[in-house]
Image (spheres, grey):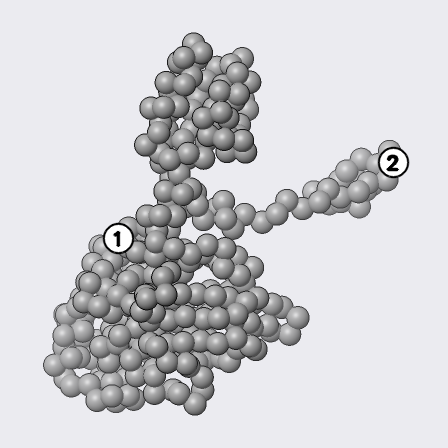
Amino acid sequence: MTASTTLALSTTNLRKSYGRQVALAGLDLEVPSGVVYGFLGPNGAGKTTTMRLLTGLIRPDSGSISVLGQSFDESKHTILYDVGALIESPSLYPHLSARDNLIVFGATGRRVGRARVEELLDLVGLRDRAGDRVSHYSMGMRQRLGIAVALLNDPKLLLLDEPANGLDPSGIVGLRDTLKALAGSGKTVFISSHILPEVQQLADIVGIVAAGRLVTQGPLSELLTSQALVRVKVQPEETAQALAVLSKLAGDGHVEISDTEAAWLTLRIVADRAAAVNRALAEVSIYASGLEAGSDLESLFLELTAPPEPPPTPTRPGAIPGWNSGVVS
């Protein structure tokens, strides 16, 4: 991020532990205003802890949080009037209707008029069921109502934890369009999700965390370009020669054999150079039987969050692993 970028949200060296379990180990985020920011990480990476810290539900052990240009701590809870949030499952009143839920939640902060309630019921597609008790709602309908609650105060910053949870395909498309429109109007949407193809269609900027630390952050288009891959398939007996040719093209350490049996080689190289890969092989009379170019968010995510290989378990001389070595398979 540049120094002139206006940040809607940032954290500096944010740390949080639960006893001996470290949830965040110095998290630094920069979320510009007016974007959809995809916050990604494997289970246990610290995503939900981060969301709870950003909404004041828990306090950090150390580090700082800035929300909408202001330092945020427990003494500045009024900042949250400009923040809407859906963290984990929506907390709703099951014995009330959707409309009455919105009216009740609308009375807890800035005053919300009836017109705003009806507008939100239309926005999330619940107008026809607005008078039904929430206890009769499906999981997806509850999720849509939770999003409406988060939008009640017309927030400048929207924090959503797995907002597509329980939504059907049409609901996911509707959510995507709504969030893009909100960002287009100048609002900031910070979304945590496991649905990586959806995030790839939705997010402008992505931050990926693993083990409580940020491993990458930046515009999604730039991250995908920097991690672009070209995969090429040759005959097994041509693998060694192809590897030598492609190493010169991509640079040392940027080519690997991704499938030994099928003779697929993977190059870390800009996807639009696939033709150059094919040409370089043809010049030494190697003709690729398969060529794939491009990268996606899922590939980037898996590469950056893969756990380290565990060290081999030592065995006693003569022991058979899984039997008398003490290793249970």
**Identity, as a three-letter code, of the amino acid under mark 1:** Pro
Residue named by callout 1 = 169
Position of the N terminus, as image quadrant, is bottom left
| Of the two numbered discs 2 and 1 in the rendering, the one whose residue sits closer to the viewer | 2
**Identity, as a three-letter code, of the amino acid under mark 2:** Pro
Q: Residue furthest top?
A: 285
Residue 97, image x and y in percent? 23, 79
> What secondary structure is marked by label 1?
helix
The mark total stands at 2
Q: What's the residue at 48%, 71% (across, down)?
A: 12
Q: Is residue 113 left or right of residue 191?
A: left
Position of the C terminus, as image quadrant, is top right
Residue 281 position by quadrant:
top left
Look at the image and tell me whether residue 231 can be seen.
Answer: yes
Look at the image and tell me whether residue 131 can be seen.
Answer: no
Give the camera-side residue of 264 and 219: 219
Residue 151, image x and y in percent? 25, 75
Residue named by callout 2 = 317
Q: Residue furthest front?
A: 3
